Amino acid sequence: MRYMDEPTAIEPKQPFSIDLQEDFVDKCETWEDIVSLGLVAREYKDKSQWVLGKCALFVETKYGESNTDKYAKEIGVDAKTLQNYRWVVKSYLKDDPEFKPSSKLPFKLYETVATMPKEERTKFLEQADDNNFSIERARVERKKKEGKPIHPAFSLGYCKTHDKWWFVPKVREEWEKSHDLVEAEIIQ
């Protein structure tokens, strides 16, 4: 596994710094450049989730759990989101105080397996890293491993308004909001 302090797999021709005051996307000349920029942005996002989780854990330890909501408000982050980041960080640090996440795996994937026992979790993360698991694939693989039923997030439905078949989200209201849907026959 590659860890967060190691360089990205694809290096851009020119180093990118992300300055929101300029259009850094225009600096991309090749596919490798835009992939590199995307990897850097994703790593920044994941690193920020780990940093915010560690900060929230520090606040909890030093100032008490009751101050984490105040901290969230002060930094402009949703309190429940910050509490979740803290919980994920705490889950990994309690088993290994020297834990360093891989920069290849997204924070959300670590969250998906945070409740697993350390040995299982380590093996699962290695498998996810080796096989480039998406978050959804990680969730499915975990359910398979635990013997839980796997329910699709979508069903197939025929929309009479559009006269074609659609993949319909499980929460049907989300689908209806985004379409001029009069009626649909949902096939389960």
Image (tube, rainbow, N blue to C red):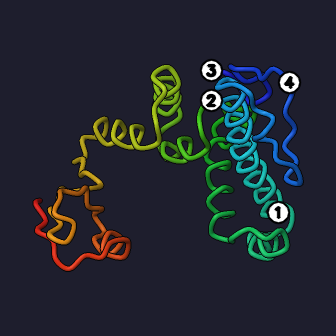
Along the line of sight, the residue nearer the viewer: 144 or 173: 173
Q: Which corner quadrant of the image does residue 1 belong to?
A: top right
- Badge 1: how crowded within 10 Å, few (<14), some, or many (20+)? some
- Per the image, the residue denoted by label 4 is 14
| Residue 99 appears in view | no
**Drawn side of residue 156 relative to residue 61, left or right:** left
Which is nearer the N-term, disc 3 or disc 4? 3
- CA gap between label 2 and label 1 equals 28 Å
Assess whether mark 3 and mark 2 are in contact (beta carbons under 8 angstroms). yes
- Amino acid under disc 2: Lys
Give the label on residue 104, or none.
2
Helix, strand or loop status at disc 4: loop
On the question of residue 162 being in view, the answer is: yes
Q: Which mark is residue 59?
A: 1
Q: Which residue is mark 3?
A: 1
The numbered mark, 1 or 3, whose residue comes first in the sequence reads 3
Q: Nearer the viewer, mark 3 or mark 4?
A: 4
> Which residue corresponds to the image point at 68% horizontal and 33% vertical from the top-left?
39
Q: Say which of 26 and 56 sits in front.
A: 26
What is the distance, in whole Å, between disc 2 and disc 4 at their CAs? Answer: 21 Å
- Give, as a three-letter code, the residue at label 3: Met
Label 1 sits on a secondary structure element that is: helix
Please report the residue visible at 18 percent of the width from the left and 66 percent of the height from the top.
Answer: 159
* Quadrant holding the C terminus: bottom left
Separation of disc 4 and disc 1 at Cα? Answer: 38 Å
Q: What kind of residue is marked 4?
A: Gln
